[in-house]
Structure formats: C-alpha cells, structure tokens
Amino acid sequence: MSEVHLGCPPRFSGLYLSHFTFSSLPLEHCLGGSDGAHGGGCEMAAATSSSWRRSDDHVLTVQHGITSSIQSVGLQVWKAAMLLTDFVLHKSFTSSEFDGVTAMEIGAGTGLVGLAQARVARKVFVTDRGTDILDNCLANARLNSSTLKFDEAKIHIRELDWKTSWPPPVGTRDASDPSSIYLWSASEIEEAEKATLLLAADVIYSDGLTDLFFDTVRQLMSRGVKKVLYLTLEKRYNFSLDDLDVVANGYKHFRTFFAVQDGCGGLNNAASKPGLVGERIDLEKVPQYIREYERGEDLEMWKLMYCCPD
C-alpha cells in the first residue's frame, strides 16, 4: 500500500493526526555524507535511532483517514503527495521561483501540497470535490497556519468537480448551507486563471477520472496567463488478461495525454494529443525533506506545459 500514516493504533477508524517533520536542509544532509558523518548540525533524537532534530525543524500536522472507499481516497495521505511537497519545499529553500505566485492544487486531497506552497505564495487555491474532503482541507489549513507561518487568508478552499471541467459554476454563499463556503465567485475564477503554478499529486488511478482531469487541465491552462503543472504519481500494477502480465495500464493511459519533450527540447511522441507537452523530472534532483516516508521505485514527477497551436 502507498498511503502514509504514522503511529496509528490497530483497527483505528475515522480521522487521525499524523505529524511530518522537515527542515531547511534535505534529509541526506541530516543523515550525513558517504563517510557516515552527521552533517548540518543535526542531533539524534532520543525517541528513535532514525529521527533527527534541527533548530529550524518544522512540523506539518495532517488530519487524514486511514482507510476509505474509492470516493474518499482524498482523505488519505499518499506517497506522491509527499514527493510533490518535497519539491515545493526544495523550491522554497533554494530559489525564489515560487515566491509570491498564485497557485492552484488540483485534486488536493488533504491539502498537504497546497499548505506547503502557502508558506511562500501570494495565494493558493486548494481544490477538490466533496464536502467531507473540503472540510478536512479546511481543518488542515487551520492546524498548520501558525506552525508554517502563513496567513489563512491566502488559502482558498474551493470545490472543483472535473465532471463540469473549467470554469466551475459561480455560486452564492448561503448561511443555511455550510458547504456553500466552497463555492466560487466570478472574481475568484478570474484570479485562478491568472495562476502561474498548478500542482497535482496522485490523481492518476482511474482512466475515467484521468480523462476528466486532463479535460479540466487543458481548459484551465489554455486560459489567462501561461501556466506550468507539476504532477506526481505512483505507478500501480495489476495483472492483465490481455497482456498475460502485470502492467500499469493507468500509467499507459496517462501517457497518451501529452507529447514528451526530450532533453534537447524536441518532441519525441508524435502520437500524443496536441496541446500539452510534458517533461519527466529526474527525482535525483528533488531531495527528500520530509522524513517520515520512503519513496520506493514507482514514483514519477512530470512538468507539463500547454502549447498553443500555431
């Protein structure tokens, strides 16, 4: 299984709080170099032999589910979200590229990635579908605003149903309907179309939803300013009677939605659908900051751009 939860009691049900730690230095620096030296001024914590503490440690507190139905997978924390959070943290610690931007997390789940980006962004739209998932995003924003030192007003948690694509319907707040706080205003839609940074983690697990996701993404990226989408996923393998082998069919379907950009800037996938161009990111260039997970071999990260036809 690829979900991540820490210290959960056996047979626990309902929502649980996990605490994920990171500092301004990647984990590899805290664990020392190849000679085994303990770098970066880290000291071993008494609790476990693998835990390290620094004076600039931060804690991400995430409320999440332990098990869920397919409709509620957004209540769980997945490894691909941890990877994308590592990427956002790395950008914030090593460059100003993501500073002051308007960003949107699509299919946010627990909102983990968007909360990490809120540390440096001007505004973050955290989007998903379903009141239970959106309520949980709101709870996580409130849990982390003081420890991560971001203004909660930066976070706009909004419902985005991929079945209706983009733009979402404009709604009106209704005091008798608590879920109406997740409706969009016309001005928010206009501002979201000016977002330059899109983030999506572990949204590729159902071919039907992948179709809807990319339809929404194409509509959004073709409007307003130029945007970049960073997407992380985990390949999931199943036995195929057609192939008589274990294959990642969902991944194959995902790869049909964009042309692949090679290292020289050219396109090497002529059969792909027009519009989106993707470049796979070498994970060796994305250091691990969050300590409480193992990446494994099946995670990938892609950078996608929308190219307008001539």
Image: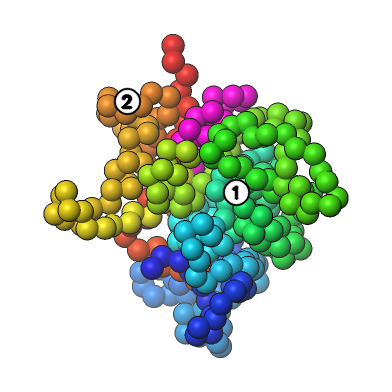
Closer mark to the observer between disc 1 and disc 2: 1
SS class, disc 1 = strand
Residue that badge 2 annotates = 266
- For the C terminus, the quadrant is top left
Q: Amino acid at mark 1?
A: Asp
- For the N terminus, the quadrant is bottom left
SS class, disc 2 = loop
Choose the circle earlier in sequence order: 1 or 2: 1
Residue at 56%, 88% in the rendered image: 46
What span is in magenta?
A: 214-230
Q: Amino acid at mark 2?
A: Gly
Residue 256's x, y, as percent?
32, 35
- Furthest residue toward left: 244
In this rendering, the answer to whether 39 lies above or below 218 is below
Numbered tag placed on residue 110 in the rendering: none
- Residue 298 visible in image: yes
Q: Is residue 173 left or right of residue 118?
A: right
Question: 198 or 109, which lies in front?
Answer: 109
